[in-house]
């Protein structure tokens, strides 16, 4: 199934310069602002039909939020997840899955309670968080388990910024 047919591009306002940008549900890399080139928050709603294309094939880590519209804790946690996706623009993709409309995704991750958060990278589960949690706990959980990119690893290994040169 064509992802573009079921999930047209979403308009995202750049948090840096305010420019409106069209962001597709699936693409290589991470979306950047057409004006200032800063990373854009990447938030996508998906279903069983295109979960593989939108989440499994993502080249950046994915936070899957399995939720339902009738779930109070899900609605409470959603703004925090969107804020985290904005803060981690370019390093994280937030993929929201309605459990009532995507039973295969729920079954795949063994969802027995919602909200269930699944952190993935290259289609593999890194960790899961079940139930609502305060913003600070979610931020801590996410940053603790989020894979570091190559640039961050280089900075940690060579804090002087000189890439190990004497």
Image (cartoon, rainbow, N blue to C red):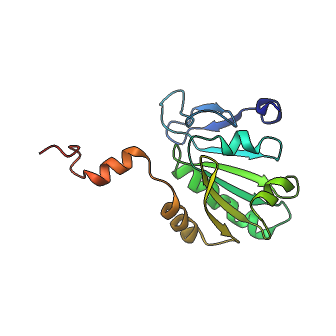
Tell me residue 3's x, y (percent).
77, 33
Q: Residue furthest left?
A: 166
**Where, quadrant-wise, is the N terminus in this rendering?**
top right
- Along the horizontal axis of the image, is 161 left or right of 112? left
| 19 vs 104, nearest the viewer | 104
How many numbered tags mark residues here? 0
| 125 vs 79, nearest the viewer | 125
Q: Quadrant of residue 104?
A: bottom right
Tell me residue 55's x, y (percent).
68, 45
- Along the horizontal axis of the image, is 45 left or right of 141? right
Q: For the point 74% across and 60% down, which residue is it?
A: 109
Tell me residue 40's x, y (percent).
56, 40
- Along the horizontal axis of the image, is 79 left or right of 163? right
Vertical relation: 22 (above or below) 158: above
Q: Residue furthest top?
A: 34
Q: For the point 75% across and 63% down, which residue is it?
A: 75
Tell me residue 42's x, y (percent).
62, 43
Vertical relation: 163 (above or below) 101: above
| 39 vs 2, nearest the viewer | 2
Q: For the point 11% across and 45% down, which residue is it?
A: 166
């Amino acid at each position: 199934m064509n992802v573009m047919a079921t999930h047209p591009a979403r308009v995202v306002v750049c948090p840096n310069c305010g420019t409106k940008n069209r962001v597709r549900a699936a693409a290589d890399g991470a979306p950047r602002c057409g004006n200032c080139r800063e990373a854009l928050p990447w938030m996508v709603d998906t279903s069983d039909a295109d979960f593989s294309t939108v989440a499994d094939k993502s080249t950046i880590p994915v936070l899957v939020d399995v939720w339902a519209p009738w779930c109070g804790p899900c609605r409470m946690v959603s703004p925090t997840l969107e804020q985290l996706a904005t803060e981690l623009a370019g390093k994280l993709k937030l993929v929201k899955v309605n459990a009532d409309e995507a039973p295969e995704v729920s079954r795949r991750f063994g969802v027995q309670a919602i909200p269930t958060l699944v952190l993935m990278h290259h289609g593999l589960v890194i960790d899961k968080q079940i139930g609502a949690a305060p913003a600070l706990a979610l931020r801590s959980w996410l940053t603790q388990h989020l894979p570091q990119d190559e640039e961050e690893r280089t900075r940690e290994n060579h804090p002087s910024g000189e890439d190990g040169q004497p």
